[in-house]
Image (cartoon, grey):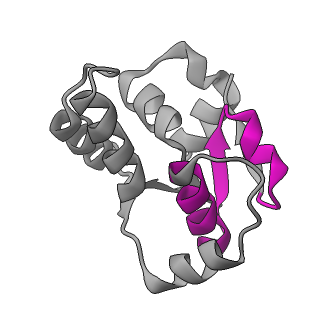
Amino acid sequence: MKLLLDTHALIWAVQDNPRLGRRARARIGDRKNKVLFSTVSIWEILIKIRTGKLHIDWRKLTGAAGEAGYARLDIGIDHMEALDALPLRHGDPYDHLILAQAISERATLVTADQNMKLYDVPILECG
């Protein structure tokens, strides 16, 4: 199974936060699964750091994600094609691009965000 971590799921997984939930943690920890994190998440984290809404070291976070075996998913033209076809059901641009990546990559999205359920993408809920 291919898993794409939403931004908060990436932070929770790296920080071993209980909000990730046992089921999501087990799937992420299963070496048979490929775990991805998006550069969109790093962009979102950086914006939140710069505006004072988040206080973490993004370099340590991405380093820890790599050490855990998570693969970075850069933005590609296929993701733009999926984004172009995505219906606008809510207004978060970070979510839209992460959803488009999940669709394009045929990945299950690991998230606690209820807005993600508005789209036709497999979800593994946190919590």
The quarter of the image holding the N terminus is bottom right
Out of 93 and 70, give the one closest to the viewer: 93
The answer to which of 40 and 65 lies nearer the viewer is 40
Q: In this view, does 38 lie to the left or right of 29?
A: left
Q: Tell whether position 115 is magenta.
A: yes
Magenta range = 94-121
Q: Which of 122 and 96 is in front in this view?
A: 96
Q: In which quarter of the image is residue 2?
A: bottom right
- Identify the main secondary structure in magenta: helix
Whether residue 33 can be seen here? no
The residue shown at (52%, 35%) is 9
Vertical order, 125 against 119 (above or below): above
Q: Where is residue 126 in the image (x, y as percent from the top left)?
A: 67, 29
- Residue 8 location (% of width, % of height): 50, 32
Work out which quarter of the rendered image holds the C terminus and state it. Answer: top right
x and y, in percent, of residue 62 in the image:
26, 44
For the point 59% across and 83% down, which residue is it? Answer: 81
Q: Quadrant of residue 107?
A: bottom right
